Amino acid sequence: MIIKKAEYVISGTKFEHFPQFNYPEFVFIGRSNVGKSSLLNAITNRKNLAYTSSKPGKTITLNFYNVNDEILFVDVPGYGYAERVKYDRLAYGKMIENYLNFSKNLISCFLILDSRHNPSEDDILMYNFLKHLEKEIVIIATKIDKISKNELQKNLSCIKKTLNLRTNDFIFCVSSEKRVGIELVHKYIESKISKIE
Ligand code: GTP
Ligand code: MG
């Protein structure tokens, strides 16, 4: 996948704010600080397209990015960060639900997990919610540069078991920092958009 263009479009929390492009959409969802924005940057080959931070709670609205005038990436605030100022679980749930329920161009949901940790209760809830949408779910385990290959294998089995993954769910392992596994995500996205065109 060649990234010719990657630009920020708009941020919003309500359906009226969301851009009305007719591009296939891919959404980045997951706990706070797991590396959603960093992954978006790695995939688009840009350093600072989506804002990242070592402090959880950096992304606070849905942020839309136009890639190559043919794809829309949607970066979502992380869940489960209780200390965020004004973090309102209910409002957060509504915002995400609204987006996921009404986005007619949504192709796949990237559920981003930190490869070092077992999925949380919130991850399980989100996975089950995504299952009901009948969109493709792609699990992406991030930060694999921080663990050994053995640990990664152990943790992947744990993730599969805890979420009770279906056989048709995709699972990719990446390090945005070291750019490992990004090619496979590119290939996946390409395969999806080539089916539409
Ligand atoms: P919120 O917007 O708060 O929900 O966080 P996020 O999921 O977007 O995480 P973000 O991309 O901001 O990354 C959080 C921290 O993890 C930053 O300090 C990143 O540099 C670091 N990080 C992200 N991906 C990787 C990775 O693959 N490897 C390593 N070592 N660090 C990473
Ligand atoms: Mg973020």
Image (spheres, rainbow, N blue to C red):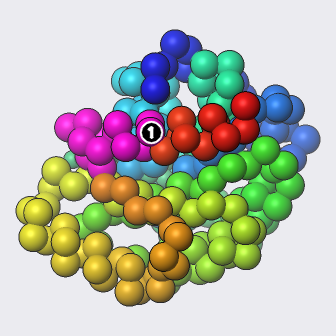
The span picked out in magenta is 174-187
- Which residue is at the front of the view, 178 or 78? 178
SS under mark 1: helix
Q: Quick one: quadrant of the C terminus? A: top right
Q: How many marks?
A: 1
The verdict on residue 175 being magenta is yes
- Which residue is at the front of the view, 26 or 50? 26
Q: Residues within 10 Å of mark 1 (few under 14, many from 20)?
A: few
Q: Circle 1 sits on which residue?
A: 187
Residue 141, position as x, y percentages in the image: 35, 60
Q: Residue at x 68, y 25 (%)?
A: 70
Amino acid at circle 1: Lys
Q: Residue at x 64, y 37 (%)?
A: 193
Residue 57, position as x, y percentages in the image: 49, 52
Vertical position of residue 26 compared to residue 65: above or below:
below
Residue 52, position as x, y percentages in the image: 41, 38
Q: Is residue 68 visible?
A: yes
The verdict on residue 109 being magenta is no
- Residue 100 as seen in the image, left or right of residue 86: right
